[in-house]
Amino acid sequence: MASPSRDDIVLLRRETPFQGYFRIDRYTLRHPLFEGGMSGDVTREVFERGHAAAVLPYDPECDTVVLIEQFRAGAYAAGDNPWIVEIVAGIIETGETADAVARREAIEEAGLAIGALEQIAEVFVSPGGTSETVALFCGRCDSRDAGGIHGIDAEDEDIRVIVKPFAEVLVDLNAGRVRSAAPLIALQWLALNRDALRARWRD
């Protein structure tokens, strides 16, 4: 049985009950049911923050990855430790490409120039409540001088750069210490593709 398509949805209303730093839209719609027929009126709020690009900087010569740590309000609101270890990421602005954002954010958040880029995937962050997607990359870098505190003051960024051997990161990954989705996906991808990637990036 074929799945329904977007064209089968009947949009009844779209409203914007909140517009601040982010936006919340409210949709009222009807959609096809798997057993046939249509649903009743369904109302859902959708968190709108745009689409993002993220990059895991990897140094094939030193076999190290570059991660970042920063305060995250969502983790604070959830009652967890709000300093989260992540990968470099940023919102894609109008007219920008995902790979260009990955390179720009690597400089802003980690002081790193990215060489070759490998696309990992483009995934929905949480499709039950937000339209946001993130384009994930692995980027070649030279990690020997990486470190320090980075970020843009005007955006209240306070970002600490962490350089780790891949073997240590793999231990963290297997121990469940990677708590954010984007680095989890990127690091698992690197674990599966590391040997082939190092062969491709061999000088």
Image (cartoon, rainbow, N blue to C red):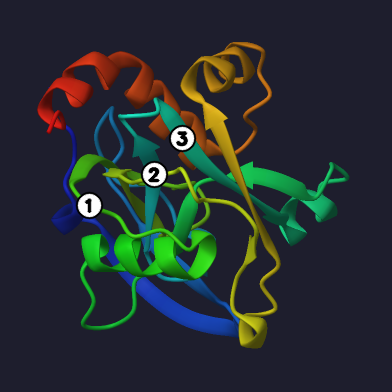
Task: Tell me what residue is drawn at x 14 percent, y 21 percent.
Answer: 199
Disc 1 crowd, CA 10 A, few/some/many (<14, 14-19, 20+): some
Please say if 139 is above or below 34.
below
Q: Amino acid at mark 3?
A: Val
Q: Amino acid at mark 1?
A: Gly
Q: Which mark is residue 115?
A: 1
**Residue 121 at what x, y percent from top left?**
26, 39
Task: Tell me what residue is drawn at x 47 percent, y 54 percent.
Answer: 88
Front-most of residues 76 and 162: 162
Per the model, the C-alpha gap separating discs 3 and 1 is 14 Å
The answer to whether residue 46 is seen in the rendering is: no
Q: Secondary structure at mark 1?
A: loop
**Residue 160 at what x, y percent from top left?**
67, 55
Q: Mark 2 sits on what residue? A: 57
Q: Amino acid at mark 2?
A: Pro
Front-most of residues 64 and 82: 64
Q: Quadrant of residue 80?
A: top right
In which quadrant will I find the N terminus? top left
Q: Quadrant of residue 164?
A: top right
Q: Are marks 1 and 2 in contact (CB under 8 Å)?
A: no
Q: Are marks 3 and 2 in contact (CB under 8 Å)?
A: yes
Q: Which mark is residue 65?
A: 3
Disc 2 crowd, CA 10 A, few/some/many (<14, 14-19, 20+): many
Please say if 97 is above or below 21.
above
Front-most of residues 149 and 54: 149
Q: Quadrant of residue 178?
A: top right
Q: Secondary structure at mark 3?
A: strand
Please say if 29 is above or below 161.
below
First-in-chain label (3 vs 1): 3
Q: Which mark is residue 100?
A: none
Per the model, the C-alpha gap separating discs 3 and 2 is 6 Å
The answer to whether residue 170 is seen in the rendering is: yes
